[in-house]
Amino acid sequence: VSEESPLETSQEIFNFDTAMQFFLTSLQSFGSILGYVALVLALVIFIFLEVAVFPGKVRAAFGDSHDVLGFINRVNRAIEQYFFIKTISNALTGVIVTAVMWSFGLEFAFFWGMMTFLLNYIPYFGAIIAAVPAILIGLLSGGWFPAIGMGLTFLLTSLFFGNYFEPRLLGQSVNLSILFIFSAMLFWSWILGPVGMIFAVPLTAALKIILEMNHSTRWMGILLAAGPPPRE
């Protein structure tokens, strides 16, 4: 009967301790993430509810001023359209991630699909935050093939939805430069905390609309855009 060497025993203890530390740290992180997820869901629901009644409230407060109502309706449509298209995009991405993880036989497929749906409300960084744990699950559970498969899944969905699907449906309503999106994320997260990263795009889009409506500040709105405005 072969006996385990002290080196092999120490490696097993080290691996077990490392795994337990990682597990406990992950539980703490999941608790913070779940609280953040609940906040995101509540905010999105309240936004959809408020968008439906806000124009009527403005009309009651300021009367039928066409300038005020035109501005409010334009901002309202931009924010409503952004969150509506973003929700559809995130939901489709979450379904694809769940299906791919399930096809590889990986655990927590539905959970990470839901996390992908919620985290993708954060532009650019959300997809990365969602992708890393899913790729690690694929690597630890099935090896390099599932890990590469999950990596390609996140890469392709990000490229398709971020560069084609969302810009095509949103059009000029949220036509912001990537540089200013990153700057807005830093600014609004500093003001509002993590929630500011979710609202960076719609808040900056509203600012862009405000600047474009005034002739003297229209040039600032053009600079915020991803490209020159269409010729009239």
Image: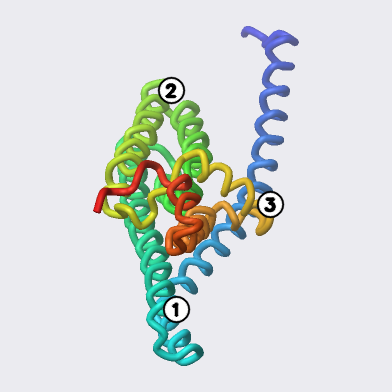
Residue under numbered circle 2 = 143
Q: Label 1, label 3: how many angstroms apart (C-alpha)?
A: 30 Å
Colour scheme of the rendered structure? rainbow
Q: Are marks 1 and 3 in contact (CB under 8 Å)?
A: no
Residue 22 location in percent, x, y?
66, 35
| 104, above or below 165, in the image | above
In the image, 19: left or right of 164?
right
Kind of residue at disc 1? Val
Q: Label 2, label 3: how many angstroms apart (C-alpha)?
A: 39 Å
Q: Residue at x 51, y 59 (%)?
A: 207
Q: Quadrant of the C terminus?
A: bottom left
Kind of residue at disc 3? Trp
| 123, above or below 78, in the image | above
Residue 21 location in percent, x, y?
71, 35
Q: Residue at x 61, y 50 (%)?
A: 30
Residue under numbered circle 3 = 190
| 127, above or below 122, in the image | above
Residue 1 location in percent, x, y?
62, 8
Q: Earlier in the sequence, mark 2 or mark 1?
A: 1
Residue 116 versus residue 173: which sits nearer the camera?
173
| Neighbourhood count class around disc 1 (C-alpha, 10 Å): few under 14, some 14–19, many 20 upward | some
Kind of residue at disc 2? Gly
Residue 49 versus residue 167: which sits nearer the camera?
167
| Neighbourhood count class around disc 3 (C-alpha, 10 Å): few under 14, some 14–19, many 20 upward | few
Residue under numbered circle 1 = 68
